[in-house]
Image (cartoon, rainbow, N blue to C red):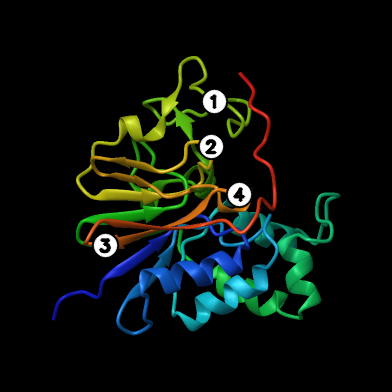
Amino acid sequence: MSERPILFVGDIQGCAEELAQLLDAAGFRPGRHRLIPVGDTVNRGPDAPGVLRMLREAEAEPVQGNHERHLLAILDRGEYPNWLRKGSAHAQLTETGELDRAAEWIRIWPLYREGPDWIVVHAGLHPALEPAQTDASFMTEVRYCTAEGGLPRVPDGKLTGSPDGFRPWYEFYGGTPTVIYGHWARQGLLVRDRLRGLDTGCVYGGHLTGLWWPEDRIVQVNSTQPYRRLPVPKT
């Protein structure tokens, strides 16, 4: 029996309306297809509870992104920083009474998933270590690194080019499987040999992107509106 077709989905970030539109446009059917979001399913957007309900109904198999990890870290520490204001995933899930159930599910999401010819991870792969040996923070946050896996000292999310001495992580990738990832809205859709970057900034007014596999076909829907603005670039 052949494997079920897979629909990979880029960073949803609480955009439930767009997720529903994408699943409809792609013709996704639970049971017939697999759904694998690439992480950052929640935060920044307006409806984290709606997204998680939809993913449960679709029997989705997400991986953790940095926003899921931040949510769990807040719960584990019992600390609520200033940015945890109304509108965050934590606040939305608390208001709907779904925080505990959501956290219980998110905790069991892996950092990566693999298939015969693909691997999905939120941010990227370490150039010198196997995924099972790589820190969670690297796999969910990396954009630029060195050939040894060194990271910039400052956050690189606002940069528009490689910091001195660093390159995009995927330039060091030498594996065979196609890496399917998100996390890089400013970069947008990336389609290269053995690389598929699916974060197309839905929460910023861009698109929500899906990838059918093994057909290797892109499906996109427009964002309903820009819920947030991309950070101002730094050089």
Q: CA distance from mark 4 to mark 1?
A: 19 Å
Which callout, 3 or 4, points to the residue nearer the camera? 4
Q: CA distance from mark 2 to mark 4?
A: 12 Å
Residue 50 horizontal side relative to residue 200, left or right: right
Vertically, is 103 above or below 224? below
Q: Quadrant of the N terminus?
A: bottom left
Looking at the image, is mark 3 or mark 2 earlier in the sequence? 2
Vertically, is 198 above or below 16? above
Instruction: Name the residue tied to disc 4.
Output: 205
Residue 2 horizontal side relative to residue 46, left or right: left
Pointer 1 with pointer 2, Cβ within 8 A: yes
| Amino acid type, label 2 | Arg
Instruction: Name the residue tied to disc 3.
Output: 213
Q: Quadrant of residue 90?
A: bottom right
Q: Can residue 148 be seen in this snapshot?
A: yes
Vertically, is 185 above or below 159? below
Instruction: Name the residue tied to disc 1.
Output: 160
